[in-house]
Image (spheres, helix red, strand yellow):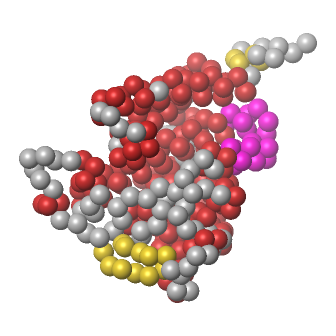
Amino acid sequence: MKNPFSNSKEDRFRTGWRIFIFLLLFWVFASIIFLIKPLFGEIGKREFLQNYSLIIIAILAFSATVSVFISRKYLDKKSFVSLGLILNKRTIQDILFGFFLSGLMAGLFLVLLRTFNLIEYNGLNFGDVRNVSKDSFDFVNYMSLISIGSLSLLLLEHILVGYWEELVFRGYILQNLIEGMGLKLAIIISCLLYGLIHATNPNAGILSSLIIILFGYLRIYGYLSTKMLWLSMGMHMGWNFFQGPIFGFAASGHKKATLIDLTITSNKDWLTGGEFGPEASIIVIPIILIALFIMNWYSKKQNRLSNI
């Protein structure tokens, strides 16, 4: 009779238990967020999550790194870098290519909406941080202005989000699922899980959840085509940064200060994405398909160069 908890041949827990223990570890470390909340005074949960998102995301990135490292070493009995985190000459290339490919995707979405008169351009929101009092500096007010400094902090925020989400979803969870149930079923479960989690975001709906599932596959393809997480991380970082802080859309239901000031002039959210952002618009679907072809071309080109 098979042991339901461990695999005697591999001398480790079975896939489901490894993922469960990892998620438990992640939750324990991430709970630091709720321990530090009282340090910011009497503030509501939503206001805390919105105004101090950079601190929260940094804690999540730390929690993900520590949890994955522990789980990879002691549960999987493999190295941390074997998830697709080996540093080599392609690392920066993959990250930058993914980052700017996502920038082109968000830019194309902007152009299409403007072409079909679905949005109105109102100018740039480049604020003057000198108006923020030095005597009573307020981080929240500072981040409500678009400046070189606040854009840099927003970029850092999205770098951390792209890093930890790819490390967890396309790194630890996906690759353990592949080992436990094979590639096809692992892809399906991973994409469904990714869509389900984002279904809890503000202004989410059925369409946004389905498109997020497609984005999940896009990121999985980034890993599968290169056997590294760097391309997927770069695309995740770039997509969130360009669609939100730069081009003025909401990012998965969240919106902060943006460089470009836009007004959505259509009430057809299935076209514009509405308050959720591009990930709730059917227009982004062909853009994702184009990105998949470009990623396929890029990965094949890079693999040929590596073999020379």
Q: Is residue 238 visible?
A: no
**Residue 295's quadrant in the figure?**
bottom right
The C terminus is located in which quarter? bottom right
Q: Check the image and report above or below for 267 versus 197.
A: below
Q: Nearer the viewer, residue 302 or 172?
A: 172
- Residue 180 in magenta? yes
Q: Position of residue 266 (x, y in %)?
A: 55, 79
Left or right of residue 303, residue 162 in this image: left
Magenta extent:
175-193
Q: Nearer the viewer, residue 11 or 120?
A: 120
Q: Position of residue 99 (x, y in %)?
A: 46, 60
Left or right of residue 34, residue 288 in this image: right
In percent of the image, x 44 and y 76: which residue is there?
A: 263
The N terminus is located in which quarter? top right
Q: Main secondary structure of the magenta part?
A: helix
Q: Is residue 1 visible?
A: yes
Q: Nearer the viewer, residue 226 or 257?
A: 257
Q: Position of residue 225 (x, y in %)?
A: 64, 54
**Residue 282's quadrant in the figure?**
bottom right
Q: Position of residue 267 (x, y in %)?
A: 58, 76
